Amino acid sequence: MEKIVAACGLVCSGCFAYKATIKNDDVLRAKTAEFWSTIYGANIKTEDINCAGCLTDGIKFNHCLECEIRKCCLEKGYENCAYCPDYSCEMLDGLLTNIAEARIVLDEIKASL
């Protein structure tokens, strides 16, 4: 499977919502909705678990549609934040503080440019 990286450095192709969408797997959708509802303290429904990837065409998970990092990256026309001359900005740093894996992905991409 091709590695798809979100604007923020999360790996879309490793995300449960992405996998459930690509495989059209309702069992995985239900498990993901239950798990995310628990860890995020939200009411996420099975039918909410659909996403074709942050910067790709197609359906998005609700949060992805509202994500300011995604919006900024799209407006600037970058593949992801590693391509931005302002990497790593204040908006992104808040997320990367909590998700070290995303910073590693973006740092690797930035180093390869």
Image: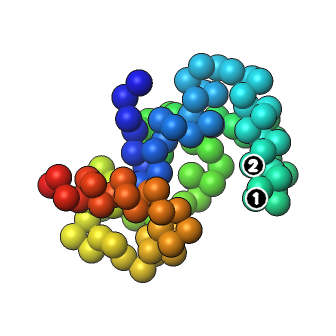
Q: Which residue is mark 1?
A: 40
Q: Position of residue 96 (x, y in %)?
A: 47, 67
Quadrant location of the N terminus in the rendered image: top left
In this rendering, the answer to whether 93 lies above or below 13 is below
Q: CA distance from mark 1 to mark 2?
A: 6 Å
Residue at left offset 27%, top offset 74%: 86
Q: Quadrant of residue 71?
A: bottom left
- 58 sits to left or right of 28: left
Determine whether the residue tagged by mark 1 lies in a helix, strand or loop. Answer: helix
Query: Which secondary structure lies at badge 2?
Result: helix
Label 2, residues with CA under 10 Å away: few <14, some 14-19, many ≥20: some
Residue 54 percent coordinates (x, y): 47, 46
Q: At 56% from the left edge and 34% from the top edge, which residue is drawn?
A: 18
In the depicted view, which residue is nearer to us: 8 or 105? 105
Relative to 112, does residue 24 appear above or below in the rendering?
A: above
Disc 2 designates what residue? 36
Q: How far from the left and from the top, in percent, is residue 25? A: 69, 21
Is the residue under label 2 in contact with that under label 1 (CB below 8 Å)? yes
Label 2 is placed on what type of residue?
Trp
For the C terminus, give its image quadrant. bottom left
Please tell me which residue is depicted at 33% across the width and 72% down the height of the picture.
Answer: 88
